[in-house]
Structures are given as C-alpha cells and as structure tokens.
Amino acid sequence: MIKDIQQQILALKKEKDVCILAHCYQTHDILEVADYVGDSFGLAQRAAETSAKTVMMCGVRFMAETVKILCPEKRVLLPEADAGCPMAEQLDAEMLSQLKAKYPGYAVVAYINTTAELKTLCDVCVTSSSAAKIIKRLPEDKILFIPDRNLGTFIKNQCPEKEIVTVRGCCPTHAQFTKADVMKAKSAHPKALLLVHPECDPEVVSEADFIGSTTEIMDFARKSDNREFIIGTENSIVQHLGIECIDKLFYPLSKDFVCRNMQLTKLASVFHCLNGTGGEEIVMDEETRLAAKKCIDRMLELGNG
C-alpha cells in the first residue's frame, strides 16, 4: 500500500511540475518521494535552484515561509497547515520590538527558526551551523539573539569576545532532556558516541562527543569509525541513519525525543496536497517578503568565504 501511494505521488509531482522538499525529521516514506532532503535553509536554497513552478515543503510553517521569501515567483505548499514550530512562535513582532527597545544598539540575530514576521525586524539570520561564524564577523559587539536560549548559550561559548543576550525561547522537544537522560543512555550503551543538537540544554550539550546541526550529526555518523551512536535530536534521525548505515547501531537519547509538529505530515498529507484535496499555499505580501529577505541576504553575505 505504501509503495502504491508513493508511485501515485511520483506521478502527480511529475504531472504538476512540483519539487518536493523534505526536512530530515520527516518519516522515511516521505524522504523516499522527495527531490531533496536536508535542513531547513539548505532546502530553501534548493527550492530557489529548481526549475519547478511549485515547491512543497514537508516540514513546518517557518520553513515554507523561508522558501517563499527566496522564491516569490513559485507556488509554495505546506502539506499540513497545522504543522508549526513552537520555538518560532514564542515571540511576535510586538514582543521583539519591546526587546529591541530594552537593548538599543544591539544587533538582532535571528535563528532561521523564526517566522517571516520576526525576520522583518532582525539584522541578520543564522543557521545552527553558521551562527558562530556569522556573529564573529558582525561589526557590533553587542548581540540580541532570538529565539533559542540554548543555541544562544552554545554560541556565547564560541564567541567570548561578544556580549550576547538571549531570551527565554527554546525548542520544547530538544530542551526537555536532561543530564539524567544522558547518563541513562550512556549506561545502556557504553560504547556509543553521543551526538547532540545545540538546541539541547547546556548540561546535555556538555556531555556530547559531537555537537552540530541535523545534517552535521548525520555526516559525522556516516564518516565516523565508531560503530554505535546515541542520537540527541529528533528520533526520525535514528531511523534514517539506521537504514543508511546498516553496519552501525543508532540509539535515541530518549524514546520521547519526538517533534509532534514535524510528525503531523504523513505520506497521505503529501498525496492530498498534490491532489488539491489538502494542504495550504503560503501567501506573503511583497513588503513583508522583502523586509524578511534582508536578514537572509546579510547571512549569505557574512557567511561567504
């Protein structure tokens, strides 16, 4: 049955000239029908490169918004309208305006995991893998980092020459795990290396053998000579790596390491979105798009070289 649905999806996307993007946290049956798989910003860049007139983002809303920011001429679809990101939604424009008033003269750095509305008020955008490099290159010494306090703390440790203020936002999935979870997993799998995302709590990050973005975690596991790994990010990565690297063993940091928003998108969601019986088109006015794009352009400018 799954293969039948996948074949229908492949036929529909070809017929309707649709490029399917899938974030790494999507289930494997969705990855198998995607044109590109990766982290959110890398996928948005792929969308800008494709000749397809329509792009479907299998992920969450801020990711689809980023695609629209970079690809105004394309039709951008989100297969599950309710797939949001709690971290991206923890701040709104009014709250950020108040923070900017509280910290005048600070450069506002936004994690890519923010809404288009927030991006319009920021100076530069960053990904988890590019954040430290870009912040080091900013002329300002005072930084207001939004919205993830855990990623902000991780960056602080890499940029001691900067004064970095963080806010109370976080990824509720990554932030819920503790050092006790780490000790339990390491006790069960003493030969395994711990690979974690910097959105995790600092006490979890401090125990890691490797810290990086989702794609960096996957690349590390692929290339490592080690045979066993504890994965400190969304549990879909355990499945994907287990299939890709069948000679290695992968364990979740916790069975509860699940992003419920990411898991809202099912294979049937993709089918119905392609078929016109589900999903939502991302619509954005040009003033908002251009204002939000400025901080992304700044990221690309500072990140080059």
Image (cartoon, rainbow, N blue to C red):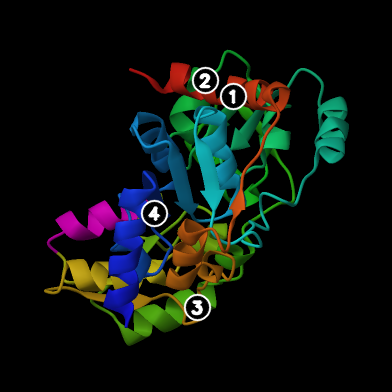
Mark 1 touches mark 2? (CB < 8 Å)? yes
Asked where in the image residue 68 lies, by quadrant, the reply is: top right
Quick one: SS at disc 2?
A: helix
- Residue at screen point 41% across, 30% down: 48
Residue for badge 1: 293
In the image, is residue 260 part of the stretch drawn in magenta?
no
Question: Which is more foreground, mark 4 or mark 1?
Answer: 1
Magenta highlight range: 215-225
Mark 4 touches mark 1? (CB < 8 Å)? no
- Residue at screen point 35% across, 73% down: 5
Marks counted in the figure total 4
Residue for badge 3: 181
Which badge, 3 or 2, is on the more N-terminal residue? 3
Residue type at the position of mark 3: Asp
Q: CA distance from mark 4 to mark 1?
A: 24 Å
Residue type at the position of mark 1: Lys
Residue for badge 4: 214
Quick one: SS at disc 4?
A: helix
